[in-house]
């Protein structure tokens, strides 16, 4: 939600995991995989990973003169040979090498994001790539955006945060509808806007997982209320739905 709010204001956030100050408990491990997670989170169209090589090669070009640049990798699963082609970086700039870039690319591809691995020292490389110029290695997404979103939502199905819904809401969801505040009876747990929440019946039957438009404090005020009352009750609105159908997966 924070990243989306910044982007909505025209602000480009810088997300970085500093090798020297990141704690083991919360660290991702490298900025390549961190960038892939951010790309999936904001449903980015393109993730550009910059390195000290022209792209991904069939083998390490520094030790094998027969190495060839791979222009494009299709949506199929990475082959064993492709994984073996990823060697370590000798630039000394942080933790990540080509292997972590390939891992990050695979993570982003499974979220529906296209990836380009290219040389960072090329002049105006970011502008050139975003303008459609061919450079480096392009890796095509495994799934489309909708499927990628569903996978990310389902990854939150282990959450203990629950929205309890009535029988009418269950029927509406089964017909492809959104969850409206009127169908919410009460809330278990604590969550913020944009968090994954499980939708359950009064007898604890799991119905769906979705990304909520409202945090716990706000949604508690809206339980059983009509959507037309949201702005009057809260003084603002993030939409008529507690959870929109596009951000929900039925279980």
Image: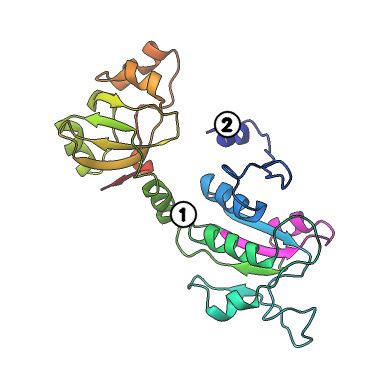
Quadrant in the picture for residue 17: top right
Q: CA distance from mark 2 to mark 1?
A: 20 Å
Q: Secondary structure at mark 1?
A: helix
Q: Which mark is residue 159?
A: none
Residue 119 horizontal/vertical position (percent): 77, 64
Q: Secondary structure at mark 2?
A: helix
- Is 251 located above or below residue 65 in the figure? above
Sequence-wise, which precedes: disc 2 or disc 1? 2
Q: Examine the structure image and report whether residue 45 is included in the region drawn in magenta.
A: no
Q: Residue beneath label 2, please?
A: 5
Residue at image point 23% right, 36% down:
200
Quadrant in the picture for residue 126: bottom right
How many other residues sit within 10 Å of disc 1, few (<14), some (14-19) or many (≥20)?
Answer: some
Residue at image point 69% right, 40% down:
14
Q: Residue beneath label 1, please?
A: 145
Q: Which residues are magenta?
A: 114-133
How many other residues sit within 10 Å of disc 2, few (<14), some (14-19) or many (≥20)?
Answer: few
Locate residue 172 relative to residue 4 in the image: left or right.
left
């Amino acid at each position: 939600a924070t990243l989306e709010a910044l982007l909505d204001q025209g602000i480009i956030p810088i997300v970085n995991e500093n090798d020297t100050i990141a704690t083991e408990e919360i660290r991702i491990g490298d900025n390549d995989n961190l960038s892939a997670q951010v790309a999936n989170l904001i449903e980015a169209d393109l993730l550009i990973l910059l390195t000290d090589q022209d792209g991904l090669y069939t083998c390490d070009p520094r030790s094998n003169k027969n190495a060839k640049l791979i222009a494009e990798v299709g949506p199929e699963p990475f082959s064993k040979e492709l994984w073996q082609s990823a060697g370590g970086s000798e630039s000394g700039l942080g933790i990540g090498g080509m292997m972590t870039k390939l891992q990050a690319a695979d993570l982003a591809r499974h979220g529906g994001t296209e990836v380009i691995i290219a040389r960072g020292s090329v002049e105006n490389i970011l502008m050139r790539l975003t303008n459609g110029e061919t450079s480096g290695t392009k890796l095509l997404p495994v799934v489309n955006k909708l499927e990628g979103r569903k996978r990310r939502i389902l990854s939150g199905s282990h959450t203990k945060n629950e929205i309890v819904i009535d029988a009418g809401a269950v029927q509406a969801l089964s017909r492809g509808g959104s969850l409206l505040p009127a169908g919410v009876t009460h809330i278990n747990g604590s969550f913020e806007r944009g968090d994954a929440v499980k939708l359950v019946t009064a007898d604890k039957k799991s119905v769906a997982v979705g990304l909520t438009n409202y945090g716990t404090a706000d949604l508690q005020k809206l339980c059983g209320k009509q959507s037309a009352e949201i702005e009057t009750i809260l003084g603002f609105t993030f939409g008529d739905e507690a959870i929109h159908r596009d951000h929900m997966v039925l279980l």
